[in-house]
Amino acid sequence: MLKNLFATHNMVKEGFRRGEIPSSKEAYGTFLRIALPSIVEMTSLALIGMVSMAMVGQLGEEAIAAVGLTAQPRMIFMALFFALNVGVTAVISRRKGENDQEAARSCVRQAIYIGGAISIVMMVLAVLLSEPTMRLAGADYDTLVPSIAYFRIVALALPLNALTMCISAAQRGVSNTRVTMVVNIIANIVNVLFHYLLVEGRWGFPRLEIEGAAYAVVISSAAGLIMAIASLMKKNAYLHLSLKDSWRIDKPMVRSIAKIGGNSIFEQMCLRIGFFAYALVIASLGTAAFASHHIAMQLMNLSFTFADGIAVAATALVGQQLGKKRPDLSLMYGKIGQRLALIISVFLCAFTILGRYWFTSIYSYDPYIIETATGLLLILAVIQPIQTSQVVMGGSLRGAGDTRYVAFTMLITVALVRPLLSLFLVFVMDMGLTGAWYAVIADQMLRLILLYGRFAQGKWALIKV
């Protein structure tokens, strides 16, 4: 039964086939060559982020909560870049499949224009609106000042982050995940190094505490951008750029990016509004509860990175095969990603259950926080298999350009179900922080049903990019 479940010849029905289906060994090998660098990259970023947060955690629960409160506002200010990158990856992967290298290179140039202009505007807004943003995020008397200080400094890195993300999205579109892996891992090693030097003041560096953590983010973002630009300067690179290229605005290409990215903007706004509203519910439960929640979210984010690494490969391969007029292989690669996600989720569940006390003790010595966070990790173990599958299904649909349906799904599940159900369970049913996490289970399950159902229908194969 397991052999049939994972066999490629069972993934595509006879009537949908457009040619020969590769063997399981060949197809899984192709998928993993793209996915493994992305998994290593995403996982390393999450692990390094966890180490950085552990350093901040030594300053106390207020420091953990203050940094945690900035997470969703930062994502809101970066939402446009995430949407832009979805369009960049989808368009470039399709052009790669069509073997149109010049169009792919033009897409990178236009994305750099758009991302650079938007990022400067968002940086200025983030700095000017830092105090009201943190108040809205739920900062209290003990977290307001440090959260504002941290948010203002990391806002300076928005243009750096935006351009690095744009270039990485382009490289993923042509399956060059090894480049993005190297860029992001090295940048985040720099991040950890300067966290170590600046948070508590070591090797002659000043002790800057939370502000030091923020400066570490800015320095590492600059390092990442330098390496990302260098990856485009190599003459043998598929996406090689030069000052001699035409840097004029390419309106048809901008429209192609906007067609996909426009729906993704709506998706991102649904995500950010939903996550922000959900975070407000958690923040209302107090500093200790929010700190416990943020610790558990560190491991949930780690789980997401495994799935996101697989989703990167699914996005690229689905788009490339559609460019080659092989929707049957797009379907096959999407299903391969979902199968691999399920395998990984088994190991994640085991680690979460068995290592929950060790994991929470890394961040805090407070008995209440440890007890609360370990309880949340048991709920996370239920979420992980659902989460990994729905993330890959979403990535497959984005690769096909079906971003409108993905946006619709996020509106229903993240923007409506999660915050509204958490309000009901927390305040009406008086279930506290546990109730808020039960709402996450409902959100993730509904998301999986909607995304998997859409992918199985195959309507995405008809979308023009």
Image (cartoon, rainbow, N blue to C red):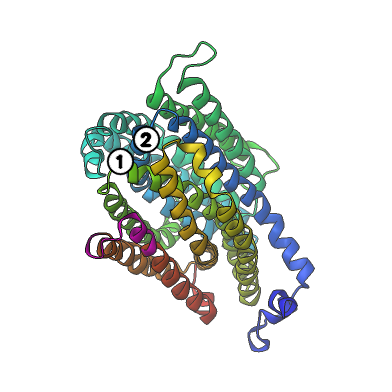
Instruction: Judge the density around disc 2: few (<14), some (14-19), many (≥20) Cα neighbours within 10 Å.
Output: many
Q: Which residues are magenta?
A: 427-438
Secondary structure, magenta segment, majority class: helix
Out of 297 and 110, give the one closest to the viewer: 297
Q: Earlier in the sequence, mark 2 or mark 1?
A: 2
Q: Is residue 185 left or right of residue 195?
A: right
In this orientation, does residue 103 appear?
Answer: no
- Residue 303 is marked as none
- Residue at mark 1: 287
Instruction: Judge the density around disc 1: few (<14), some (14-19), many (≥20) Cα neighbours within 10 Å.
Output: many
**Residue 393 drawn at (x, y percent):** 53, 68
Q: Extreme front residue here?
A: 367
Out of 385 and 316, give the one closest to the viewer: 385
Per the image, label 2 sits on a secondary structure element best described as helix
- Residue 61 is marked as 2
Which residue is found at the position 76% from the left and 73% from the top? Answer: 22
Q: Is residue 149 above or below residue 423?
A: above
